[in-house]
């Protein structure tokens, strides 16, 4: 018997493949009243647009991307998929906000030979720097340090630091390159430069290998042929974990909603006691042979503190951040750029990490729909420890007014604080 702690996409995926490979008893313990974790979609029934509180699109590339598309097929969600091809303006137009202006990042080969603001020189010179800079044998370093050393300070400041804000709301000066960009790190260590490693991989991994990988996945084959950049689902990405959760239940898994594991006790090799508090205030002791944990590291630290204090201490040292997410909808079309959105590098000293132009991605007619992400690594610096939703909303509206020149009050808003 196996317990899965957490009903987000990670826990649900683990339970699904476990049940698929070996028939057994599985219990999912989820603290909220539904599946999905960070993936939350709110649909406006009157006007049809979506507010996504967390992830909103999925990349189809690589083994993980193809496996996800295969899972979508198995869940009979193929007809719900909305692809965004690489030819779409939002896939080609990515913006960064620097020096009080929005700048379109270079997206073509020819743009590498031009000076594109906010960069002070053609990006081809940054590539030349990587090709001519000797490698340094290292065990690890920060992403910022790695990129600055190989491509220059401007790439580190504007491109990579912004990208890390968009990926994990983190500080590129503190995150390990070996952890988050291990392939780039290995390219330098093995081939002497990032680009040399990239080109070697590109020439040794032709399209026919990718075609072989997708031959059993019609959706994967379609994604490759149509050159999808990302995809989402018609009724919001939350439909993915919700459908997956229902399928797992059909296969015999039990689910305990509004229940929280508060302690793990290990007995010998194949016995674990989960102390579970439910919504009624009752405490239950569940006995399991295996436990799959998909909870945040600090939460796990408290579960194992009594029996494994050293492990608990290590887990508590893994940093995490708080992100304020503000969804905004304005009646009318107010954006001057047809783009995915913009990111703001930390050097701009703004509370906003980035803004996604949802109405450009999904073509909401007569509406401008935005998602504003704020705080992250710098949350307490800008909002303290007890900011109200009203304060967060007004901060988001001020930044949108300043950067995107949208002065009117929104028609719909939603504020979430993701801790």
Image (tube, helix red, strand yellow):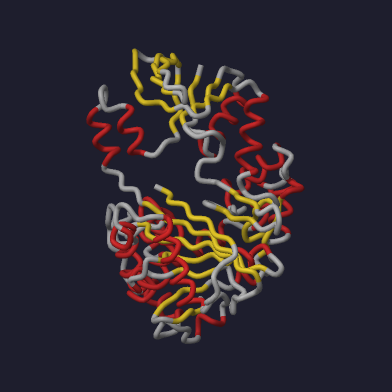
Residue at position x 59%, y 22% in the image: 253
Residue 195 coordinates in the image, percent (x, y): 45, 67
Residue at position x 59%, y 65% in the image: 411
Nearest to the observer: residue 273 or residue 138: 273
Residue at position x 50%, y 70% in the image: 342
What is the quadrant of residue 152 in the picture? bottom left
Asked whether, in this view, residue 138 is left or right of residue 396, the answer is left
**How many numbered marks, from 0 up?**
0
* 38 versus 248 height, above or below: below
Residue 322 coordinates in the image, percent (x, y): 37, 52
Nearest to the observer: residue 261 or residue 136: 261
Residue 347 coordinates in the image, percent (x, y): 33, 72
Nearest to the observer: residue 272 or residue 225: 272
Residue 181 visible? The answer is: no
Residue 90 visible? The answer is: yes
* 281 versus 410 height, above or below: above
Nearest to the observer: residue 386 or residue 352: 386
Residue at position x 26%, y 22% in the image: 307
What is the quadrant of residue 21 in the picture? top right
Residue 297 coordinates in the image, percent (x, y): 35, 38
What is the quadrant of residue 51 in the picture? bottom right
Asked whether, in this view, residue 216 is left or right of residue 237, the answer is right
């Amino acid at each position: 018997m196996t317990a899965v702690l957490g009903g987000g996409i990670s826990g649900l995926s683990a339970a699904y493949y476990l049940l698929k490979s070996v028939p057994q008893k599985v219990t999912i313990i989820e603290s909220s009243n539904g599946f999905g974790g960070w993936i939350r979609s709110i649909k406006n029934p009157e006007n049809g647009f979506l507010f996504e509180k967390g992830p909103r699109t999925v990349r189809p590339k690589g083994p993980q991307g193809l496996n996800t598309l295969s899972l979508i097929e198995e869940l009979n969600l193929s007809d719900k998929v909305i692809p965004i091809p690489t030819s779409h303006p939002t896939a080609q137009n990515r913006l960064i906000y620097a020096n009080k202006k929005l700048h379109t990042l270079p997206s073509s080969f020819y743009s590498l030979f031009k000076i594109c603001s906010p960069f002070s020189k053609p990006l081809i010179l940054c590539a030349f720097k990587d090709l001519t800079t000797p490698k340094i044998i290292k065990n690890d370093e920060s992403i910022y340090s790695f990129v600055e050393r190989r491509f220059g300070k401007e790439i580190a400041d504007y491109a990579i630091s912004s990208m890390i804000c968009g990926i994990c709301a983190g500080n590129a000066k503190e995150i390990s390159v070996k952890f988050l960009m291990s392939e780039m790190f290995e390219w330098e260590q093995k081939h002497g430069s990032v680009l040399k490693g990239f080109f070697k991989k590109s020439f040794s991994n032709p399209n026919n290998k990718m075609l072989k990988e997708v031959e059993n996945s019609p959706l994967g084959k379609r994604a490759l042929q149509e050159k999808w950049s990302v995809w989402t689902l018609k009724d919001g990405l939350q439909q993915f974990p919700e459908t997956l959760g229902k399928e797992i239940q059909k296969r015999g898994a039990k689910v305990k909603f509004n229940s929280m594991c508060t302690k793990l006790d290990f007995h010998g090799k194949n016995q674990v006691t989960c102390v579970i508090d439910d919504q009624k205030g009752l405490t239950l002791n569940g006995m399991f042979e295996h436990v799959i944990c998909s909870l945040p590291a600090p939460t796990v630290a408290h579960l194992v503190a009594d029996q494994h204090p050293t492990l608990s201490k290590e887990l508590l040292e893994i940093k995490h951040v708080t992100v304020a997410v503000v969804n905004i909808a304005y009646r009318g079309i107010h954006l001057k750029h047809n783009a995915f959105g913009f990111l703001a590098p930390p050097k701009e000293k703004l509370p906003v990490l980035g803004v996604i132009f949802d109405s450009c991605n999904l073509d909401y007619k007569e509406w401008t729909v935005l998602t504003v992400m704020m705080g992250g690594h710098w949350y307490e610096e800008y909002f303290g420890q007890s900011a109200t939703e009203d304060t967060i909303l007004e901060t988001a509206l001020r930044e949108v007014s300043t950067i995107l020149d949208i002065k009117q009050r929104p028609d719909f808003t939603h504020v979430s604080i993701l801790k």
